[in-house]
Amino acid sequence: MDLRYTPAERAFRAEVRQWLSDHVPAEPFPDFDSSVEGFEAHRQWERTLHAGGWGMVTWPVEYGGRGLDLIRWLIFEEEYYRAGAPLRVNQNGIFLLGPTLIDYGTPEQKARFLPAMAAGDEIWAQAWSEPSAGSDLAGVRSTLGRDGDTYVLSGHKIWSSRAVHADWAFGLFREPGSERHKGLSLVFFPLDAAGVTVQPIARLDGKPVFAELFLDEVRVPVANRLGEEGQGWSVCMSTAGFERGLMLRSPARFQVAAAKLVELYRGRADSVEPEIRARVLQAWMDADAYALSIYATASRLMAGGTIGPETSTNKIFWSELDLDLHKTALAILGAEAELTGAAPDASVDIGDWLDGYIFSLAGPIYAGANEIQRNIIAERMLGMPR
Amino acid sequence: MDLRYTPAERAFRAEVRQWLSDHVPAEPFPDFDSSVEGFEAHRQWERTLHAGGWGMVTWPVEYGGRGLDLIRWLIFEEEYYRAGAPLRVNQNGIFLLGPTLIDYGTPEQKARFLPAMAAGDEIWAQAWSEPSAGSDLAGVRSTLGRDGDTYVLSGHKIWSSRAVHADWAFGLFREPGSERHKGLSLVFFPLDAAGVTVQPIARLDGKPVFAELFLDEVRVPVANRLGEEGQGWSVCMSTAGFERGLMLRSPARFQVAAAKLVELYRGRADSVEPEIRARVLQAWMDADAYALSIYATASRLMAGGTIGPETSTNKIFWSELDLDLHKTALAILGAEAELTGAAPDASVDIGDWLDGYIFSLAGPIYAGANEIQRNIIAERMLGMPR
Amino acid sequence: MDFRLSDEQQMLAEMVGQMLAETCTGADLRRLLDGGEPRDAARWEQIVALGLPGTMAPETAGGSGLGAVEMALIATACGYAALPEPLVEHAGVAVPLLAAAGIDLGPALSGSTVAVGHPVNPFVADADTADALLLADRDAVHLVPREQVTLVHQPSIDPFRRLFRVEWAASPQTRIGVGALWQETLDRGALSAAAQLLGLAQRSVDLSVAYASDRQQFGKPIGSFQAVKHHLANAQVKIEFARPVILAAAAMPPSPLARARISHAKLAATAAAETATHAAVQVHGAMGYSWEVDVHFLLKRSLALAQAWGTPAFHRARVAEHVLSAPLGADRTFDAGQIEEIHREAA
Amino acid sequence: MDFRLSDEQQMLAEMVGQMLAETCTGADLRRLLDGGEPRDAARWEQIVALGLPGTMAPETAGGSGLGAVEMALIATACGYAALPEPLVEHAGVAVPLLAAAGIDLGPALSGSTVAVGHPVNPFVADADTADALLLADRDAVHLVPREQVTLVHQPSIDPFRRLFRVEWAASPQTRIGVGALWQETLDRGALSAAAQLLGLAQRSVDLSVAYASDRQQFGKPIGSFQAVKHHLANAQVKIEFARPVILAAAAMPPSPLARARISHAKLAATAAAETATHAAVQVHGAMGYSWEVDVHFLLKRSLALAQAWGTPAFHRARVAEHVLSAPLGADRTFDAGQIEEIHREAA
């Protein structure tokens, strides 16, 4: 164990910091779900990142990355959140599908999809859930028929994030007559393909952050399948690992939120009740513990280790710390916590804590509800009977 | 709703208070599990109570009670705990079996058992659990054979509280070949009967508060069966209702503990961390809420209502409040919390908080583990699918 | 001592619950939002026709002359339905204050509403649809016609709570009373909020039970999984032990204990509502996180009412004031005055 | 940056774990108690023969010259086994203090033990079997032979913790150092306690998994019930996120951040141990509440170590000191000094 950054790592951090300081927009963009303008501003930012060589530093150079290791990725993320840079509109692509493509894709698939993903030219949506397949993802019913070198996709996907404005989506499709985990394939399809209908779904605060996708005989090349035919489940589980594990939820994100919470508390410490202090400290400690744990996992992976059921402990830990952190912020805000802060004539600026709270409520649900994650920990990590 | 005590209720309280003030021993007895002396001192106190007419105020006069209502019982309990009177060594009898006997017993059984129970002449142990029947009580395997007017009991009971020193026990016995909830009968047997072996079991702190009972062809009259033959399960569930519900765990017990906790906190408020305050207040509020809820239940029962799955909400609530309350006390005691206070040369008097904590650890387990109670609430109170 | 609701009280609660079950469904709420109107005129007419605004008004003034227990039952039903109209604050808070100040209740019982700007709340709810506002100028209570104030809208997460900062100037003409009135008003507001929170907590559980019994995953209803059962059982336990606190707080005459218990009621109901609404979001999964399912109405109202009429910090401090100074004991569950008398008699 | 244990560190942890799995079973613990001896002489001999008392002693003084990470791994294994002998405090706390004060380590590495009377602890553990005691006289550190002190026994709930109040008189002859030593000693003690708590938390989960997989109720192993699974999964999550904090705290050079992280490690390990031991009692049911099953050894040690070497209140205050005053941020997970340098370079 050596917890000092090497001179090269420190130089890398300084380089990232300098570039971000030169490029991060001074004013936040409008959010990427509510309007085309917001979405395109974020896409443009992805292009700027890519032009600077920062699209996805861990990817091979040939696909638009820098071929760097996971510690460097963590350093990049720390600086990215520290700089207050925009959220990554292509997170479904770069954090979830991208790593899976690198593991399972053919050379042609990698060449076709990764550079456009890294450049922000193609923004990706996920299309996992279906009306009767949520926590039980193996219950998907959407089908894939084969017509020569073409797949014909039909079915109904739901809770597809980013799909309202994105270019491409990936999802599981079933060979007709197959059951549960068998006969599934992971297939990509363009969201503007003939037969795809995208219907926005409003989140509880009215923002259209999801969509329903209706697929009616959508024709895509067989080359759009990732992994072997019928092996979609294991490919998908690998992606889910990235989703729950170290990729989607950077520790930096929670460390920045915890630091903001500490700041909020410092400003009001005299007027809040004494019980709040412990909750604020817990938020900082939890964000810190999460960061340390991810550094440990990254070190292990760099030395050839693999990621297993600990993605489930990660998922539970970050989703609960995020919810607790935001509940604590609302408790500090007190009677002003219910204000959305959206009106220009609002009396007080309560920041975006309420928005963050609403987002945090989804944490224990998506990427596999925490109840399912607890089952996974008990059965696969502890070896308890099913 | 009228939350004022009537003049008669107030007079009753004054009478109880006066009598207890005249009779409660100044020095606490040794505990009733660790020695015959302690047990017999408590038995003597039961006799004193009975002589004063206070054995069980709700029972009919003919069985040694006063025929009073449940509000009077709550008042009696409040005064009893307020006075710091000894724990009731016969609680398995007077609080659990007694009420069930009154509901299900024949006139002969009532006349035979209730007066001796009220008088403390016969102290009762429960014999519910078996090695393979704990939370799943319907898994009992002990059998009852019939030989004319005699039952022949065989089997192995465990976690039988009070059985080390008590006179009688009650438990479930199965007709050979019967399964699960069928074929069970609730039967009484003397603990000194031929064929009964009592083997003490030490609690985690070493106190012999339980026993294992080995029954080898123990012969008892058929008249020792409570309720119909084979209907033992429903009789037992009625007893369990008393156990989880309002009888066994008087609100007064928790109110006195909460008041003691407040006192402990008041004395150390300046030196404990600020987070403790909310936990102390929560303990007081929870004890208060429990008391109010039991007053509401008592009022309903007095008007002819019945007690149903709310015994399960009671069980969860009191067991969790008791555990939290004691954990808070240990947090206040800090580095001294680990002292048992048992040595005469101990530097500090930390009271009996540690003992109370150990006792409170059992709350979520006995009388049906809280996991089972939550199932009952979900299935029987909320109507969720089994 | 009798801790039961009377038959009349139970009938009142059922009647209001039934009326709201018919007129205030999730579909009704969504229709109201889509229409952009602050109130459903037909529903409000029905509420007025039933005499509910006059629940706590004296019979001599045309009211029902009922007490805080009846008002708590009505407020619970309103919380259960997530009622958009300001019946609870009007009937449970404004009307008793107006009555105590000797104001003519005619308009307030026949459809007009009065909004309450209590100093404990930073904003005034539903001020735009009120005929008049009760406002504080230091100790004094003022009743100010709406046209004499300027309202600055403050958007709440609850789409049915229209909050305003109020700009106004006190004058001798609008002054109707002093100090003590605000204290009683705070207690009434806190108790009403607690009762609403209780109702919406129960609705959250009921909606979740129905959804979990229907929704299938892994080949069976999700409600048959222990984790789902236990989420809802935990919420129900909190509800069961908040309810008697609210009823006792409502039924007790004013005293330091009663005041502490009102705060206890607010805290317990807030905790029950938080547990129940979060369980509802979790049990409904992504559905519970969407606009189309009713859960969010309850979640948002819960978020708002948790902090309104005294934050948890405020009420915990009030409980502390009592608990850390008053004599405590198993004999002190009810009126402390009577208990003192017993102590004297026994001494 | 490399947050992995070396092969040597992993082998050390496995070796100690294996030795204790063989020599310190539940049956061994009960036998020791029945015999009334404070230590198992054979096991202690084996521990000494393996050189474990000298883990942190300089190689020049006959020790292994290892660091806090290795000591934390050993302490975790000792916690896992609920080891009765005072290896952790002796090797992890007393020996480094003696070494820093320039005391000859000969006896301390060959079987004798030294007990530590740090001012943060009200009592001295295992003082009766120690050859000497490290004691505080205001700022000064004294090394006092046991025969020069009077020990007053204080019974702990943990049958293997023999606690004493110590009566003694400071003299120039016993004084070996001053102030700063006590601060480092506190950090070492807190970290050692945290590592033991982590080990006993994991043991509690492991015992419970084994019991729940075996014990049948309702016709299947209780470990197949979701409620039982989730109790243990929750404990395991707490363990997983305490472990890296302990390792990072051990691996970092002294700094205000490192100090805060030691306190964080103690708090996180205490929470993990409380969750895990309570889950173990609950999952074992009445068995977990009995003397005959090993759970209680872990529960009692957890109760004691939670409060030893700084209570949760003490450590939360230390975390607050750092968090509420230092600059925070996503880039400050590791050594703050280096970070400052980057800030300068980038400016």
Image (cartoon, coloured by chain):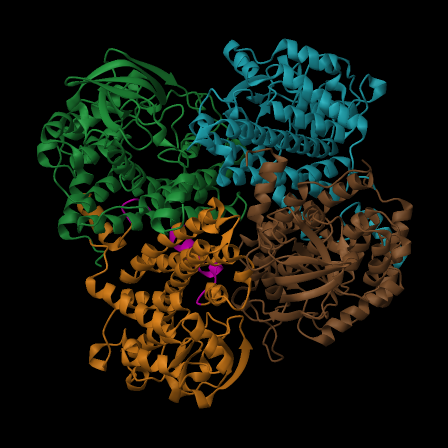
Chain colours: A brown, B green, C orange, D cyan
Camera-nearest residue between B291 and B261: B291
User: In the picture, which quadrant includes the C terminus of chain C?
Assistant: top left
Q: Is residue D168 left or right of residue A242?
A: left
Residue D162 image offset from top left, x and y in percent: 55, 20
What residue lies at 68% left-to-right and 19% top-to-bottom?
D18
Q: Give yes or no for residue C127 being in the magenta stretch.
A: no
Quadrant in which residue B127 is drawn: top left
Give above or below for B144 relative to C254: above
Give above or below for D127 relative to D256: above
Where are the magenta residues, as a range? C309-332
Q: Is residue A71 left or right of residue B172?
A: right
Camera-nearest residue between A161 and C199: A161
Examine the rendering and report whether any part of residue B274 can be seen: yes
What residue lies at 47% left-to-right and 66% top-to-bottom?
C294
Residue A137 image offset from top left, x and y in percent: 60, 51
What residue lies at 84% left-to-right and 49% top-to-bottom?
A72
Camera-nearest residue between C78 and D227: D227
